[in-house]
C-alpha cells in the first residue's frame, strides 16, 4: 500500500475514534460508540499489518492468545469487578508502550535527540502506568490494603526518583547508541517501575476513581509518545485522544471531590481509618425492619435511590431495579441519583444500573437531583457513604469538607441500607445516620431489598 492510502485509512480510523468517543458521553449511545471505536481500531490494525510486512505467524498467535484471555475475562469477570479490570487494562497499555519503545531502541539505537526523548517518555510513563495500575488493581481487589500507605520521607524519595529519571533521560538522549546509553535506558525503566509503586501506594481507596482516570490518561500519553518513536500517525492520534480524555475526566473527578489533583496524589487521604462506629458525630440511630421500610415506601409518591459501592459488592442492581418496577406499578415516581465518584471508578454506578436495564431517563446526576431533593418523599441510600455525608457541608473540621455531595438529608425520609456502622473510605463517621429523618436498615443490600420485594408482592 502507498503511504497516501495508509494515511487515508488512518484518517478514517481517527474519525471513527472521535465519533465513538463522542457517543460514549451518553448511556443511550455508549455501546454503539464503543463498537464504532473498535471498528476504527480494526481498520488501523489491518492497514498497519498489510503495510509493514510483519511476521503474521507471531501476530496471529498473539491475537489468538489475547482473544482467548479477553473472552475468558468477558465471561467470568463480574460487573462488580470492572474497576480492577479497568486498572489492569490501563497497566497493560502502559507496559505495551514501554516494550514498544524498548524494542524500537534495541533495533535502531541510532536515534535523534527528539526520538530519544519521546522514547524516554514512552518508557517512563508506560512503566509508571504499569506498576501504578498493578497497585491500584491490588487495592481495588482487596489483595493489598486499601488504606493510604504513608511512610516518612515519601515525598523526598519520590522527588529523588524523578530527579534520577530526568538525569538519566538527559544522558541517554545525548548518545543513545553508546553502551552507556543502553545502561541509562535500563535505569529509566527500573526507576519508572519503582515510581509507579511509590506514587500509588500512598493513595487511599477513597481516591481510586481519580487514580483510575489518571492512569488511563498516562496510558494514552505513553502510547502517543510510542507513536512518535515508531512514526505511526494513528498511534499518535489514538494516544492523544486517550490522554486528553483521561485528563479531562480526572479533572471532573477532582471537582466532584472538591480537591486538587496534587491533594489527591500527595495528601495520603484515608491513611487512618477509624474503628467501628468512628469518632465522628454520635447520637441516636433509628433502625428499621423490612416491614417498616415497606410501609414507608408503599405510601411514597416519589423515591430516589442513591447507589454506592455497597450495591456493587452485594450485586444488588437487579433486585433494586425490580423494587423500582414495583414502586412504579404502585404509582410512585422512581429516580436513581448518581454521584460522579460513587463506587470505585468513573461511571461505576451507571454501568451497574445499565446492566440491570434501568431506563436511562431515570438516571439523574447530582447537580440535577439536589435542587429537587426536598420534594422527594423517600431517599433510599444503598451502600453509599462519603458521597452523602452532611459533614461535607456543615463540618469544617472534616477531611471531606467542601466535597459536593448528594443532599439526601433534605428528603422527607431517608432509608440507609448498610451492613454496619463502619465508616466509609474516608475513615469518618457519617452524620446522616443520626439525622431525625433517617432510618437505618441493616443487612446485606441484596437480601434487604429482596425482603422489600417480597413485602410488596405479599401485599399484592
Image (cartoon, grey):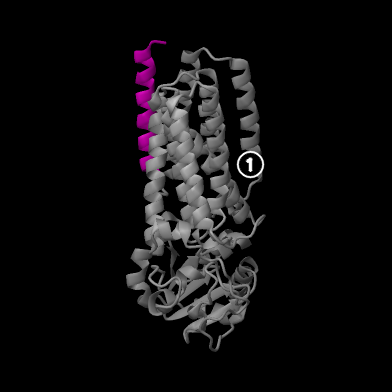
Q: Which residue is mark 1?
A: 73
Give the overall secondary structure of the magenta segment. helix
Q: Quadrant of residue 240?
A: top left
Picture coordinates of residue 73 (x, y %)? 63, 41
Residue 166 falls left or right of residue 132: left
Picture coordinates of residue 449 (x, y %)? 60, 69
Picture coordinates of residue 212 (x, y %)? 50, 50
Camera-nearest residue between 416 and 224 = 224
Residue 38 in sight in this render? no
Which residue is at a point 42% across and 81% down the rendered structure image? 412
Picture coordinates of residue 410 (x, y %)? 39, 78
Which residue is at a point 41% across and 57% down the rendered structure image? 262
Task: Report the span colored magenta.
Answer: 1-25
**130 inside magenta stretch:** no
Which residue is at a point 36% across and 76% down the rendered structure image? 375
Q: Residue furthest bottom?
A: 284
Camera-nearest residue between 205 and 51 = 205
Camera-nearest residue between 100 and 27 = 100
Q: Quadrant of residue 317?
A: bottom right
Amino acid at each position: 500500500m502507498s503511504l497516501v492510502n495508509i494515511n487515508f485509512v488512518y484518517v478514517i480510523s481517527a474519525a471513527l475514534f472521535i465519533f465513538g468517543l463522542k457517543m460514549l458521553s451518553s448511556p443511550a449511545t455508549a455501546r454503539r460508540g464503543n463498537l464504532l471505536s473498535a471498528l476504527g481500531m480494526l481498520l488501523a490494525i489491518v492497514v498497519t499489518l498489510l503495510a509493514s510486512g510483519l511476521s503474521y505467524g507471531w501476530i496471529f498467535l498473539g491475537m489468538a492468545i489475547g482473544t482467548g484471555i479477553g473472552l475468558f475475562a468477558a465471561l467470568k469477570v463480574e460487573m462488580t469487578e470492572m474497576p480492577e479490570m479497568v486498572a489492569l487494562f490501563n497497566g497493560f497499555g502502559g507496559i505495551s508502550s514501554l516494550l514498544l519503545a524498548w524494542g524500537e531502541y534495541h533495533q535502531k539505537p541510532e536515534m535523534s535527540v527528539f526520538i530519544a526523548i519521546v522514547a524516554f517518555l514512552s518508557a517512563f510513563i508506560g512503566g509508571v502506568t504499569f506498576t501504578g495500575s498493578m497497585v491500584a488493581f491490588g487495592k481495588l481487589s482487596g489483595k493489598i490494603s486499601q488504606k493510604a500507605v504513608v511512610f516518612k520521607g515519601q515525598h523526598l524519595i519520590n522527588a529523588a526518583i524523578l530527579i534520577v529519571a530526568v538525569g538519566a533521560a538527559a544522558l541517554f538522549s545525548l548518545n543513545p547508541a553508546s553502551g552507556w546509553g543502553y545502561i541509562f535506558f535500563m535505569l529509566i525503566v527500573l526507576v519508572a517501575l519503582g515510581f509507579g509503586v511509590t506514587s500509588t501506594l500512598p493513595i487511599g481507596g477513597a481516591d481510586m476513581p481519580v487514580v483510575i482516570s489518571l492512569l488511563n490518561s498516562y496510558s494514552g500519553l505513553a502510547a502517543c509518545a510510542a507513536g512518535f518513536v515508531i512514526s505511526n500517525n494513528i498511534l499518535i492520534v489514538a494516544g492523544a485522544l486517550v490522554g486528553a480524555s483521561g485528563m479531562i475526566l480526572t479533572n471532573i473527578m477532582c471537582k466532584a471531590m472538591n480537591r486538587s489533583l496534587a491533594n489527591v496524589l500527595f495528601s495520603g487521604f484515608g491513611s487512618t481509618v477509624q474503628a467501628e462506629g468512628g469518632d465522628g458525630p454520635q447520637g441516636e440511630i433509628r433502625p428499621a425492619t423490612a416491614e417498616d421500610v415497606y410501609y414507608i415506601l408503599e405510601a411514597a409518591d416519589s423515591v430516589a435511590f442513591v447507589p454506592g459501592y455497597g450495591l456493587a459488592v452485594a450485586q444488588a442492581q437487579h433486585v433494586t431495579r425490580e423494587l423500582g418496577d414495583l414502586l412504579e406499578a404502585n404509582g410512585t415516581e422512581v429516580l436513581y441519583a448518581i454521584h460522579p465518584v460513587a463506587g470505585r471508578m468513573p461511571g461505576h454506578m451507571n454501568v451497574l444500573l445499565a446492566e440491570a436495564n434501568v431506563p436511562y431517563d431515570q438516571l439523574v446526576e447530582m447537580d440535577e437531583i439536589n435542587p429537587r431533593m426536598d420534594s422527594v418523599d423517600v431517599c433510599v441510600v444503598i451502600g453509599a457513604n462519603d458521597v452523602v455525608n452532611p459533614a461535607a457541608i456543615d463540618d469544617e473540621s472534616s477531611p471531606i469538607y467542601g466535597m459536593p455531595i448528594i443532599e439526601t438529608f433534605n428528603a422527607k425520609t431517608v432509608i440507609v441500607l448498610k451492613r454496619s456502622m463502619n465508616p466509609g473510605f474516608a475513615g469518618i463517621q457519617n452524620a446522616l445516620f443520626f439525622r431525625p429523618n433517617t432510618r437505618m436498615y441493616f443487612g446485606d443490600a441484596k437480601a434487604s431489598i429482596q425482603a422489600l420485594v417480597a413485602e410488596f408482592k405479599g401485599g399484592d
